Image (spheres, helix red, strand yellow):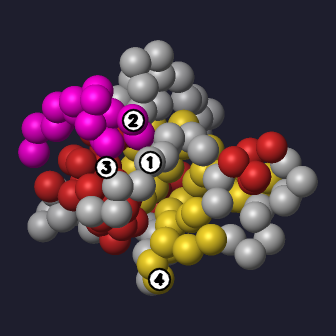
Amino acid sequence: VRQPLVVPSSPWGLFGGKFVGYSKAAFVLWLLRSHTSCHRAWQIEDDVFFTGPWSALFNAYSADESHIIASTIHHPSTSYFAHERTCFLNITTRCRSAEDRSLTAVVWPLLRMSHAVASEIARALTTQRAKGFHEA
């Protein structure tokens, strides 16, 4: 499957940006289109390095059924970031407001995502008119 084109003015374009690029949006779209051969996929930014063999990292999580594998940052409810974002995605429930208004953000230089999460991102961006930036 070829890498999808991301139109900057589309909801997918707003998921990225002209200064940070559209690789995250293109990755999610690619995963959606590759679901018959790929239920989970890794995205690794070009400036990430690993001192061991990559196979050691991938094999360590090969049996893990998690929908996302990545580092996260938790912004407490007193954080500026938590107050600016009142909605979060959950692949098993509809988008809803966080009661404590806290936010957990994914750090995306190295990430494994499931097709289910990619589908939820697509649904939110296209049918719910959600707006979001991939690093928020």
Camera-side residue of 112 and 23: 23
The answer to which image quadrant residue 26 occupies is: top left
**How far is mark 4 from mark 2, CA to CA?**
23 Å
Of helix, strand and loop, which one carries label 4? Answer: strand
Residue beneath the point at 32% across and 42% down: 11
Looking at marks 4 and 2 on the same chain, the residue that comes earlier in the sequence is marked by 2
Q: Which mark is residue 93?
A: 4
Indicate the position of residue 28 as horizontal and vertical percent values.
31, 49
Name the residue located 62 percent from the left edge and 71 percent from the top edge.
97
Task: Please determine whether, in this image, residue 89 is positioned above or below residue 52.
Answer: below
Q: Are marks 1 and 2 in contact (CB under 8 Å)?
A: yes
Q: Amino acid at mark 4?
A: Thr
In the rendered structure, which amino acid carries the disc numbered 2?
Leu
| Mark 3 lies on residue | 28
Relative image position of residue 116 (x, y in whole percent): 34, 71
Report the Cα–Cα distance between label 3 and label 4.
20 Å
Residue 14 is marked as 2
